[in-house]
Every structure is written in structure tokens, then in C-alpha cells.
Amino acid sequence: MSTLNVRLLYTLAWRNVWRNHRRTFVILVAIAFGIWSMVTLAAIMRGMIEQQVRNVINNLTGHIQVHAVGYRDDPVVDNSMPPPGPHMVEVLRGEHVRAWSTRVRVPAVVASERESAGVTLVGIDPEAEQGLSFIAEAVTEGRYLESSGDCGVLLGRKLVERLETSLGKRVVLMSQDVDNEIADRGFRVVGVFDANMEATETGYVFTGRSVAQEMLRLGENISELALVARDRQDLGAVLQLLVRVAPGLDIQPWTKLEPLLVLTVKMYEATMLIWFVVVFLAMSFGLVNTLLMAVFERTREIGLFQALGMRPGFLLSQVLLESLTVLMIGLVMGNVLAWATIASLADGLNLSAFAEGLEWAGISSVIYPLISASDVISANLLVLVLGIVASLYPAWRAARRVPVEAITRI
Amino acid sequence: MEQNVICRGLSKTYQQDAIIVQALSGIDLDVPKGDFVCLSGPSGSGKTTLLNLVGGLDAPTGGEITVAGQRVDLMSQAQLATMRLMHLGFVFQAYNLIPVLTARENVEFVMQLQGMDRKERRARARAILEDVGLEGLENRRPAQLSGGQQQRVAVARAMVSGPSLVLADEPTANLDSRNGEMLLELMRKMNEGRGVTFIIATHEQLVMDHARRLIRLHDGRIVSDELQR
């Protein structure tokens, strides 16, 4: 098809689109609303997914964890491991790793003078933990731990309330040591932390790693090593290096450590796809109907085009181009609206009315929508490609008419 | 004399439910190049059907049609489209302009499909619109033109690309006598000045009076074929 004919095609398509303003407006609103809902909902869901993943990764999981074999099934002192050797330290200080730390992490009981609760005692290296997990930034009352030998404890706000204790008071932590003897020790509450989820505030008690090692008579041994890589999507290289230097240890990425989260992410993505298809189906009925009406209304005109020598392929292209024009305008409108909506939610979408349910699912009550290029491209491509496919029928109807039938129709 | 249209044993039947209508039956016709032929007859006599078959807008059920040396009855839809584009011009009863295009764009339409460059297209469109007396109205859309003006645009469009044959179906039916007269004068001028063959289907005396040759049809058959002047 020559450039001249393409120009003619486009002129006809553009003017035909605006021939019936009201009808074009209705279908444009339908397309724009459809793509707006797809992109906006995808951004909100993507924001929720990302927040959930970040919460879990921040909540001590990191991107990769190293344990003694058996620790993940039974996280007790017996399943501890030696601190990282020089080869592993070399990998951990390499280009792929942003932050790493060793921890002691065992089940324990914490008791105040009034109440007690089952918790996970986590002995941390406070300095190394910064940039690796949430705890360094979460202390809102009192102070953060100062060193690995700090004898104070950090409690979550909800746990403080449950234990009916407060900053500066003492609590007792009890667990089993390496000889399966009860190990207990009094600690002063030096800091209170707030977390996104209540389960985190009630589930963890933090102290210095050396103090925990001493209390549990672990020597230099640790329960886990966690790290955050430079790129969450590309953990293959660092995993390979770690396996090479520590073949006897259990080295797992976050996707294996948190299978439920991975399942949730997949479920969200499937829900998004279903939503995309439902919206598109609703939209496509309007599009096909509009185009069919436009074709039937112009039956005589189509016959005239044929009488004047327009080939069937040209007619098909003209109707498809009309459809493409409407789709493109609708997509631009929808994307601009979606962008404006998402920009207006930059400070977060407050869903505190549903906070309890959201927290159960591991989601914060304020959602920060996140535009993903792949979601936007998928939604737009889906509408564009399937929209063109849906237009093929009206276009084919137009192209296959016998000229005389069309031209003599009144 | 070189023939522009040749029909041999041409027939056409339509079937509507159980009823079979014989619209044309055994038509033999030769139309030489440059002729100005008028097909007349009562409604249902087969004038429009014959015109549609010659123009390749409809397919015959029997017989042969040759236009400008090409067998129309053997062509595919795409070949027919090309033949109409390169050799034929149409003028219909109900103006049949493209409503979203201006008068000039309507006239340029066929040339644009032919792939003619913009400069030549423009020049030809301007010249022919002047010939049909529509200078100054080039940028009006059909809805902004009167019936007579629209039909003149249709004639200009049919003529501008230099067809060898123009087929016109009741071209004056929706015009008053003054505009009808003007249109026929215009067609005669095109016929005499450019040597274009005209076949016009009509039942109006005014058109018959302008024809060089008058063919009368009745019940799908040619009943008379006379030279008038």
C-alpha cells in the first residue's frame, strides 16, 4: 500500500471516528475507564505485593539465609553452625552483597513480673543489622542496641503492653542451652520498637548476639546468617558462590524461605490477569457493537468505495484503522487518568478501616501504589491486540459485501 | 469501430425465497468507444441490472461481458476493483458522495486510490471542479452542497481520473429540470470533448432526448436499439 493510500486511509478513519461524536465518546469512555481500572488496580496490587515482600524481607528474612542443615525444621540451639569462614566472608564482602549479619535465633519465653509470652529471641550485631532488617529503624522509644555485647533488650510495643512492662524495667528470658539445660537471664528493656505488623511486635525480642551466645553457651556459634543482595531479582550468582564456599550448609533464597509469600504473589498476579480479561471482555462488546453499527450505517458508503475501485483489503484496513484510532485515543486517556490517580495516591492509600484483615495477610494498612512497566505494557497490549482482533469481524463484514448489495441498500 | 462494451447472451436471475426473478435474459450489446447510450424502460425492465453487470458491481448468471478488452465476468473481486478504478466512472441516482470528505477530496478520491501524486491530483481536481461550475465550493462537505451541486461533484469524480466508460444510473432523478439539463450538458461536453463512453440508465424523457443512441428494455430484454442523431 502506497504512502498516498495510507494517508487516505488515515484521513477517512480519523474523520469517520468523529462522525458520531456521542457514540465515539461513549466507547472512548469505556476504553479509558477499562484501561484506567486495569492500570490503577494493577499499581495498587503491585504496591501491596511489593510492600508485603519488602515487609517479609525486612522482617529478618533478607534475600538469602544460611543455616545449619535441620535448623529450618527445628530452630533450636542444637542446629547452630560456626561463624562464617574466610572464604564465605570474602563472598559476603563482594560486589553482589549489600549487607549481611550473623544472628542467634532461638525460641524462648519472656516474662515480666506480671505476664509471660512465647517469643523468638534474636541475638544481633546491631551495627551489621542496619540496612539488613527493620529493627534499627523501628525503635521509637528508648534506644537501639549499641553493640553485640549489649545486655539490654528491645521489645515490640504490643509485647510491652501484653507483659504490662515498660522501658527501663527488667524482664527474664528463658530458653534451652546447648546442653539442653534451662538457660535464663534477666534483661533491662532499653528500647521499644514499632513494626508494621502486630505479629512482629509480639513475636521477637532482640538483644546483643554475644550476650545470647553466652546465655545459651553457644560459644562462637550462630543460628543464621542473613544477607541482602544488590538486586533482589538476580540472586543466582551470589547463591552459587555461597554454595561453592559452604557446601555443607542450608543456603536458601527468600522465595524458598517464604513459600506462602511466593504463592500469594502468584495469586495476586493471577487475580490481576483475570481482572484484565474481565474488563477487556466488557469493553470488547462495546467496541464490536460500535464498529458493527458504524459499518452497518455505512453500508451504502462501503458499496460506493467498492464501486470506485477500493479493494477489499483496503476496506478491511480502513475499518481496522478506525478501530485502532479509537483504541489509541482511549488508551491515552485511560493511561493519563491512571497516572493522575496513582500520582494522587503517592502519599499512600489509607485502608486502616480494613487494617485487621490486611495485617492478617501481612499487608500494611497504608498501600503505596507502584506502577510496573510490565503491568502497564501488558494491560495496554491486551486491550490493543484483542481490540484489533475484536474489530476483525466488523471489518471482515464490511470487506466481503458485494458492491451492488451495498450500494442499492436504502 | 473499436468496441468499449460487448455483452453476449447476458442473463441475470435473482432468487428471493422461492421466487425466481429473471432480471435480464439473453442480452447482446455492443457499445463503441465514445458512444452516448441511454438505457430506458419501465421500472423492473433491467436497466440498472445491466448497468451493474457492465460495471462489475454484480455477477451475471449467464453470458459474457467484455469491458475495455477485459472479460469482466471472469474477474475476481480484487481484479474487478482494479478494473473499476482504472477504467470506469460511476454516477448514481442518490449522489453517493463520501460525506466525511470535501468536494475537492471527493473528486481526488479515485486519483488518490490510483496513486497519483498530490500536485497533479490537485491540478486536475481544480480544473474539473471549474468545468462543472463549482469553483469556490471545493472545501464544502456534501451536506453543505445542494442536490445539483452534489451531482456535479459526482460527475466530476467519475470523469477526473480519465475513465474510458462512465455508467450513470438515473443521474437526474433527484434534480429539478434546470439542474438536470445542466448535468446532461456537462455529460455531453465530457463525451464530446474527451471521447468518454457514457451509458445512462433512465426513464426520464429529458435524458433520452440527449442520448445519441436509445436502447429500450422490457422484462429483461432489449426491445429496441435506435440511433437518435
Image (cartoon, coloured by chain):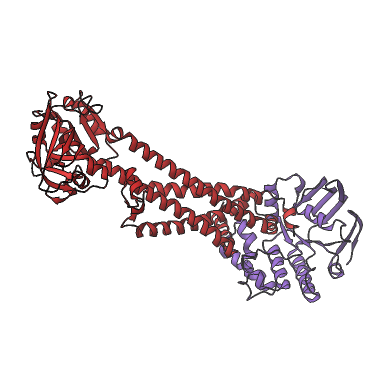
Chain colours: A red, B purple
In the rendered image, residue B170, in percent from the top left (x then y), is placed at: 80, 64
**Among the 4 quarters of the image, the one containing residue A350:** bottom left
In the rendered image, residue B33, in percent from the top left (x then y), is placed at: 79, 58
Residue B160 showing in the rendered view: yes
In the rendered image, residue A331, in percent from the top left (x then y), is placed at: 47, 55
The residue shown at (33%, 53%) is A352
Relative placement, left or right, of B64 versus A109 is: right
Viewer-closest of B13 and B182: B13
As drawn, A273 above or below B35: above
Q: Residue furthest right?
A: B223
Q: How many marks?
A: 0
Viewer-closest of B100 and A188: A188
Quadrant of the rendering where the C terminus of chain A is positioned: bottom right
**Among the 4 quarters of the image, the one containing residue A298:** bottom right
Residue A231 showing in the rendered view: no
Relative placement, left or right, of B10 versus A199 is: right
The residue shown at (77%, 48%) is B59
In the rendered image, residue A57, in percent from the top left (x then y), is placed at: 26, 41
